[in-house]
Image (cartoon, rainbow, N blue to C red):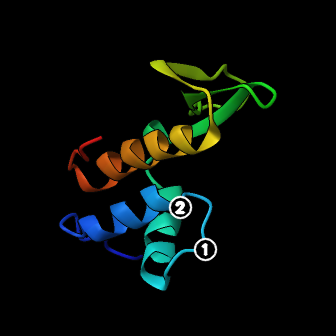
């Protein structure tokens, strides 16, 4: 499994500049690792109003349970929501906070 170097802030900047890609090979490895993070820290972007509002939620550990929405994590564009999810997943996997 790919180990993330939490000092690689250049990868955070690359993601912030273009959340939808294309991404460098190294960032692609990091994103794949973040996507298989701990179940209790599995955050996702949810479109709550088509083309108008996106929210961040935590996936339930048990199938069929409701999503747990993150307070204050509602955005007017999908890229900002993706940036928040990236930071939450980064923290879950590396233990390091990412400045906004």
Instruction: Name, please, the residue furthest toward the top.
Output: 71
User: Mark number for residue 18?
Assistant: 2
Mark 1, secondary structure of its residue:
loop
Could you give the CA–CA distance between mark 1 and mark 2, rounded to whole angstroms? 7 Å
Identified at 26% across, 47% down, the residue is: 98
Residue 65 location, quadrant: top right
User: Mark number for residue 22?
Assistant: 1
Quick one: 20 or 96, which is closer to the camera?
20
Image quadrant holding the N terminus, namely bottom left
Q: Taking the image as drawn, is residue 36 in sight?
A: no
Residue 74 location, quadrant: top right
Mark 2: few/some/many CA within 10 Å (<14, 14-19, 20+): few
Quick one: 100 or 59, which is closer to the camera?
100
Question: Where does the image place residue 48, in percent across and percent down from the top left?
Answer: 73, 22
Relative height, residue 17 to residue 82 (above, below): below
Identified at 63% across, 40% down, the residue is: 78
Name the side, left or right, on which 36 lies relative to 3: right
């Amino acid at each position: 499994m790919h180990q993330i170097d939490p000092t690689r802030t250049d990868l955070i900047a690359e993601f912030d500049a273009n959340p939808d890609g294309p991404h460098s090979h190294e960032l692609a490895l990091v994103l794949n690792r973040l996507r298989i993070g701990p179940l209790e820290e599995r955050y996702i972007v949810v479109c709550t109003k088509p083309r108008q509002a996106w929210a961040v939620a935590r996936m339930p550990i048990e199938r069929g349970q409701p999503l747990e929405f993150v307070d204050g994590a509602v955005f007017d564009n999908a890229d900002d929501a993706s940036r928040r999810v990236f930071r939450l997943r980064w923290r879950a996997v590396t233990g390091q906070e990412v400045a906004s």
